[in-house]
Structures are given as structure tokens and as C-alpha cells.
Image (tube, rainbow, N blue to C red):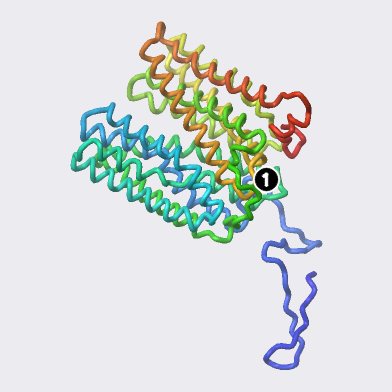
Amino acid sequence: MPRPDLTLTPAGPALAPRYRTHPTEPPRNRTHPAPVSRNPYLRLFAIPGARAFTAGNMAARLPMGMFGISAVIMVAARYDSYALAGAVTATALGAGALTGPWIARLIDRYGQARVAVPAAVHAVLGRVLLVLCVHERAPVWTLFAVTALTATLPNTGGMSRARWAHLLRGDPESLHTANSFEQAADELCFMLGPVLAALLCSALFPEAGTLVAAVLCLAGILLFTAQRATEPPVAPRTSHCSPLRAPGMAPLLAVFLATGAVFGAMEVVALAYVDGPLAGPVLALQAAGSCAAGLLYGRVRRTARLPACLAAMTALMTVPLLAATTGSLPALAAALLVAGMATAPTMVTGTGLVQRLTPESQLNEGMTLAVTALLAGVSAGSAAGGWAADHSPFPAFGFLLPPAAALLALALALCAATGPDRRADRRRFPPGPDGRA
């Protein structure tokens, strides 16, 4: 039992017990302990405030899968040019890759609520201006100028992972579960986002997808940042250098770059191979496999090493290649589902390494650097996949690229994890909670 604080009260000289317990301290009832769920996800969301900030973050993250395809549909509809639509979307992606680490650095320095809200408002206003320009068929140069204004959108996934890292300090198993959930949430949003955007643009009007995404994004950011109790405090900066200079970070970002190329190449190659209304649903199976694998991986106590995950990805990415050689669409759909199951464990393991390599005061910046490297890899993989689709000597030729990129990522991880001495190895890839890298 907590010890009573016996003090005089204003009402009189009577002794009034006032029980003081830490707000996060569990009740110390030794005779009737509170039941603890065996499900790690139920334990995760039993943390006060976890459900609220997760709901806001999911609402803000869903538009990330909507903005790209919505922009392509509305620009192509008004200007009758898919080339222009692709160039505008690529401009938004490139500008976001440049500004993302700077926005994350400001978040680390001043806090999530103080930076994320004005940054999100600025980005949403940029999206609204883009809608107005497209609707009025403004000169082409204005589309690129306005698109650059949308580059201030904060990395909501990184902010959510930073909150879990703060709430679950000293509990590596629960943090592993949280990272797995976040990866599954990413896959779910990027699976449902394009479908929702295409439905809105076709059922209502071409700009509907962008407008709905903008409203969802701003509302989600406001709800997320309103949960101040779970916001990580601004930690004193222990280093004035970028997390990019942290030992082991540069090789790990190279691995993220090659891994992104796997995703970008697979998406474009699969779309070119199917080439029809079934392309979207077939490709969504890869995200569905990753989402399911992420949730299952979160229940595993012992995490795998990054080279092992990449080796499994290399092997599973050959399955769509074998299925494509048969010419069977159902076989390709099943192969993409299986191949997607290697995505989440690889990303969860890589994310965990970023969290351990990055100083606490720069965690948002470190996570954003990883996302930037991944997106750069997606862009490179998409370009390579498009070239392969146009110059393919046989139908399944493009499906050689994803396993080749996965093999490159595996080689980079093995090179980074081996060195002249054991101490260098531990600096490059520090061991996890179970002693494994």
C-alpha cells in the first residue's frame, strides 16, 4: 500500500490521508493482480494515450497513399498528359526528399506539436492551391511551383515511432511489437489509399481525391499532436552533427536505398505485366502479404538479423519471376502475396537498427533519413522497372529486377556487418535486446 501523507487540512486539525501514487505507476495489489493479456498488441494499446495518438496518426498517414495517384488522375484529366502528371508527382517526391530531414530536425529540436502543425498547414494549403491551378488549367510551370510548396509535410510514421520509442524505453520486446504494428499500418495505408483515391476521383470529380486527402491529413495531424501526454519531450542535443554521421548509419541507409529499389521495380513491372483493371488489386496483394506478415512478426519475441531478412526477401522475390514465366495471372497474384511477406520483417528490423544507431535527441531526423533513402530507392527502382518493361526481350524479363535489387541490399548489409575487428562490427550494426544484430 502507498504510504499516506498525513497533513493538516484547511477544514480543521483532523488528520486526512492523501494517497500519492505516480500517474503511470501500476496499482500495487499483490493479492489480486490485474490480469495481463497474452496478446502483445492488446498490452501495447493498454498504454494510456496510445489509442488516441494512433487514431490520429492513421488518419494523417492514409493520405500518403492517396496524394500521388490523386495528382496523377486530376492532372491527366485536365491536361490530357500522363507525362506531365508523372513529372508533377515526381517533383513533389523529390522536394519532399530534400526538405524531409530538415522538418524532422526542427521536430527534434522544438517538439512535434510546435513544428508538425504549421508544417502540415503549409503543405495542405499547397495541395489546395494545386487543385485550384489544375481546375483552372493554369500554365504548366505553376503546377511545379505549387507542388514544391507541399514538401513541408512531416513524416507522420516517424513521429509515431518516436512516441513508441519514448513510451517503451527499457522494454525492447514491446518496442519490437510497436515497430511491427507501424510497418503493418504503413502497408495498410499504401494499400487502401490508392483504391480510395481512385474511387473518389472516378465517382465524384478528378480533384476529389486530393481534397479529401488534404482534409484527412490536416485533421489527423491536429488529433495526433493534441495528445501531448504521449509526446516525447525535447531531449538535449548530444551532438550537433547529422545522424548521417553516426557510426553505421551510412551503410544502413545504402541498404534502405537498395531495398526501396525492390519495391519500386516490383510495382512498375507488375503493373506493366498485368496492364488492365486487375493491375491494382493484384498489386495490392503484395501489400496485404506484408501487412499480415508485419502483424505476425510483432508477436515473435526474438527478432531476426537484417542479413537474414534480406536473404529471405531475395529468395521470395524470385517467386513472382517463376510465376510470370507460366503466364498465369492467378499464379502471379499468389506469388506477389508470398513475396510481400518478406517486406515487413525486413523493414521492422531495419527500423529497429535506425532507432539504436540514432541519438535520442535526433530520432525523428534519423527515421526521416531512412524514409528518404527508401523513397529514393523506390524512384530508382520505378525508373529501372519502366525501362525493363519497354525493352523487355521476354514478358517476365522485368521480374528479374526485384530479386537483383534484393541481392544487392543483402550484399550491402553483409559488407556493413563485417569488418576488421568485432568492435567495428558492433559499431556498424549494434546488437539487439537478445544480443543479435
User: Label 1, on which residue?
Assistant: 174
| Residue 162 in picture, x, y percent from top left | 59, 48
Q: Residue at x 21, y 42 (%)?
A: 135
| Residue 91 in picture, x, y percent from top left | 36, 35
Q: Is residue 194 above or below residue 152?
A: above
**In the drawing, does residue 257 fall left or right of residue 396?**
right
**In the drawing, does residue 298 fall left or right of residue 334?**
right
Quarter that holds the N terminus: bottom right
Callout 1 secondary element: helix
**In the drawing, does residue 18 fall left or right of residue 218?**
right
Label total for image: 1
Quarter that holds the C terminus: top right
Any part of residue 53 in sight = yes
Amino acid type, mark 1: Ser
Any part of residue 42 in sight = no
Residue with the most extreme front position: 240
Image quadrant in which you'd find residue 303? top right
| Residue 105 in picture, x, y percent from top left | 53, 48
